[in-house]
Amino acid sequence: MTPATYRKICIAALVAVCLIVVTGASVRLSGSGLGCADWPNCNDAKLIDVSTTHGTIEQLNRLFTGVVMIAVIAAVLGALRRKPRRRDLTRLAILIALGVPMQGVVGGIVVLTDLNPFANQQHFLLSMILVALAVVLVIRAGEPDTGVRTPTVAPRTAQYVKALTVMTGLALVSGTFVTGAGPHAGDEKAKRFDVAISSMARVHSITVLVTIAIAAALFWHLRTRHDDRAVLDNPLTTWMVIAIAQAGLGYTQYFNGVPAVLVGIHVALATALWLVTVRLQLSTSTVAEELPISAPGDLAASRSSSYE
């Protein structure tokens, strides 16, 4: 398998891992979290039961997990057949492949604990870990097979990017607490975090605003650093657009009673923002291909030519 073909497989795995986040959110937002009251069977009588709308939605999400598993297994097999074979790609693909069944186990815990908000929280955060690993896999698959990893930006710029990555992660975590305190528990009888949603929304809002402020500071930092700006411009601009849209959507949904459709879009944008964040972090270094070592005579000739 050629490196170009393998990278396409990695992209397909990344898309699948992102889509399962959205389908999982649709289960919760439609109130179908207990559409199947058992796991791995849908209920005591049937493995698959689509006799109800909630059951159908929950079953479709479970079946889509199989599609995701096929995509990540293809990434593992592709890493083994890729020429040249690379250990870093194989390890990443295996980690993702192990993470998908772990999601199934966490999903089973969510159902068996009657949609405990803490368990639901781990379900989403594990998804974000898998998204991050899949992004790394795609980026690494596109890098040269030999060479030395070198920084692409100045150390100060890299510190700004690292701070932005950490704060974006904290914003995602604080967002899961808002969800755990909000009305969309997956079932009207499910437990919620014992805290007012308004209080958690304020904490989340502050975290998001601080994160956007760091991104703005990074833009200001890059105004005179043209080389660093050329490296980070595309992912950083994309990050800022998604972040502002996400913040605006968050305030809109909060002041309109947290409608399910807007929450679903919010989850999709959160996934996209995290994907771009990881891409931005990875942009701070790359693998530079090793240049062939010139013989002393060749070096002298090149210098003589340059002087002429």
Image (cartoon, grey):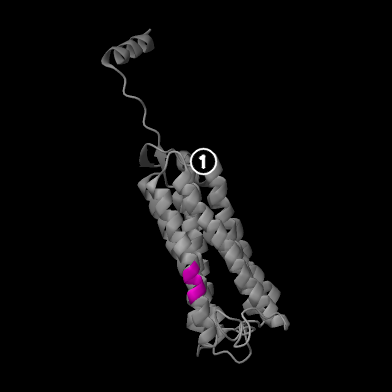
Query: How many discs appear?
Result: 1
- Bounds of the magenta segment: 101-105
Q: Residue at x 40, y 40 (%)?
A: 287
Q: Is residue 283 magenta?
A: no
User: Chief secondary structure of the magenta span?
Assistant: helix
Give whichever of 187, 199 is nearer the camera.
187
Q: Residue at x 56, y 51 (%)?
A: 11
Q: Is residue 300 above or below residue 106?
A: above
Q: Is residue 219 visible?
A: no
Query: Residue extending furthest left?
Result: 296
Percent x, y of residue 127: 51, 67
231 sits to left or right of 238 = left
The C terminus appears in which quarter of the rendering?
A: top left
Say what secondary structure mark 1 lies in. Answer: loop
Q: Quadrant of residue 114?
A: bottom right
Q: Is residue 77 above or below residue 116?
A: above
74 sits to left or right of 33 = left
Q: Is residue 182 visible?
A: yes
Q: Is residue 257 above or below residue 90?
A: below
87 sits to left or right of 250 = left
Q: Residue at x 65, y 82 (%)?
A: 32
Percent x, y of residue 136: 46, 53
> Which residue has dot 1 on it?
1
Percent x, y of residue 181: 55, 84
Query: Residue extending furthest bottom?
Result: 189
Percent x, y of residue 218: 47, 53
Q: Residues within 10 Å of mark 1 (few under 14, many from 20)?
A: few
Give whichever of 248, 180 is nearer the camera.
180
Give whichever of 230, 41 is nearer the camera.
41
Please state which amino acid type lies under the numbered disc 1: Met
Give whichever of 153, 7 is nearer the camera.
7
